[in-house]
Image (spheres, rainbow, N blue to C red):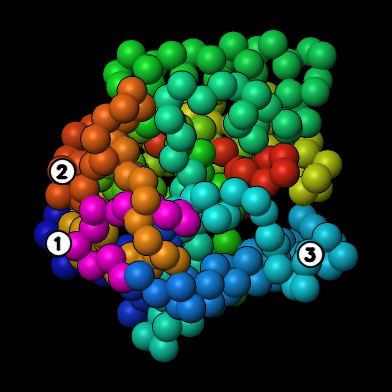
């Protein structure tokens, strides 16, 4: 399949482009990194407003659950954010990508605070599954990532933008040198899309009800080196696109976007060509669905 055909299917009828927000203090290695605290703060606010709007419209949250109309979580400032913008720089979609050192403990992950983690029938199965994935990341010297906070503006829903943004998390995971990841995905929302592109159930866990977001959730695992082969060409295109996108930081770059855990040097966008895994987990004070 040719490049233009892939791009046209991913972009649909829009002229949407990708942009990234870096974690506070991150050294990105991307060629078009801009230190711009005001724009960083602007887009961080906009993505929190978009998430709040989408989650209230979907009845996953009530308006009183928001803070000044924003779905604000502590992990936002420590995470990467993939943004989709239209030709007027209006935010059309967002995904949060939280990169962990692979020595992170189970209790430090958001999934450990989920409803299923408190269920006596399934808590041990969940923890053993997560521990297995962390062990894999350590053996392979890869990052462990949590992906969540997915939201799309109304005019982007029903288009290929949802698939495009999900594939962009695979691309970003490969650019950082590979990753193992998990996601909490809404059973009747993002889960079918994520399964289509390479997500797999974690440890045979069943869907469960998450009271915080009033919906049924599946926990899926991702390996960045093992997407559905059908989408590998699209991921390669997105890797090329991400290497040149604008990356906004909020201040001096203090630490690296490491390719792996054990003290590995920071990985630049040019260096990160190796395979990896994507782990997506919604991260809030508890979990947040990859809606």
Please give the range of residues in magenta.
Answer: 23-34
Element carrying mark 2:
loop
Q: Is residue 166 above or below residue 258?
A: below
Quarter-wise, where is residue 206 in the image? top right
Instruction: Read off the residue under disc 3.
Output: 66
- Residue 66 x/y as whole percent: 78, 64
Query: Badge 2: how crowded within 10 Å, few (<14), some, or many (20+)?
Result: some
Instruction: Read off the residue under disc 1.
Output: 3
Lower sequence index among marks 2 and 3: 3
- Residue 282 x/y as whole percent: 61, 43
Label 2 to label 1: alpha-carbon separation: 23 Å
The residue under the point 63% across, 16% down is 127
Instruction: Read off the residue under disc 2.
Output: 271
The tag on residue 63 is: none
Lower sequence index among marks 2 and 1: 1
Identify the image quadrant of the N terminus.
Answer: bottom left
């Amino acid at each position: 399949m040719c490049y233009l055909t892939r791009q046209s299917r991913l972009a649909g009828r829009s002229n949407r482009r990708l942009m990234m927000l870096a974690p506070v203090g991150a050294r990105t290695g991307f060629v078009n990194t801009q230190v711009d605290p005001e724009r960083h703060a602007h887009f961080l606010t906009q993505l929190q407003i978009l998430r709040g709007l989408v989650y209230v419209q979907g009845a996953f949250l009530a308006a009183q659950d928001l803070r000044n109309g924003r779905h604000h979580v502590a992990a936002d400032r420590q995470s990467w954010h993939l943004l989709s913008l239209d030709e007027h720089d209006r935010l059309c979609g967002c995904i949060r990508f939280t990169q962990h050192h692979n020595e992170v403990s189970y209790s430090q992950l958001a999934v450990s605070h989920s409803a299923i983690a408190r269920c006596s029938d399934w808590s041990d199965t969940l923890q053993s599954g997560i521990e297995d994935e962390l062990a894999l990341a350590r053996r392979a010297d890869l990052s462990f990532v949590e992906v969540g906070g997915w939201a799309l503006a109304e005019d982007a829903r029903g288009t290929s933008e949802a698939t495009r943004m999900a594939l962009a998390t695979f691309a970003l995971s490969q650019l950082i040198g590979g990753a193992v990841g998990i996601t909490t995905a809404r059973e009747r929302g993002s889960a079918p899309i994520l399964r289509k592109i390479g997500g797999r159930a974690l440890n045979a866990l069943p869907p469960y009800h998450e009271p915080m977001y009033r919906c049924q959730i599946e926990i899926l695992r991702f390996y960045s080196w093992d997407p559905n082969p059908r989408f590998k060409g699209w991921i390669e295109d997105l890797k090329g696109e991400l290497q040149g996108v604008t990356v906004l930081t909020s201040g001096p770059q203090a630490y690296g976007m490491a390719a792996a855990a054990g003290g590995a040097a920071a990985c630049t966008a040019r260096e990160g060509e190796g395979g990896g895994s994507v782990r997506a987990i919604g991260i809030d004070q508890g979990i947040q669905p990859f809606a």
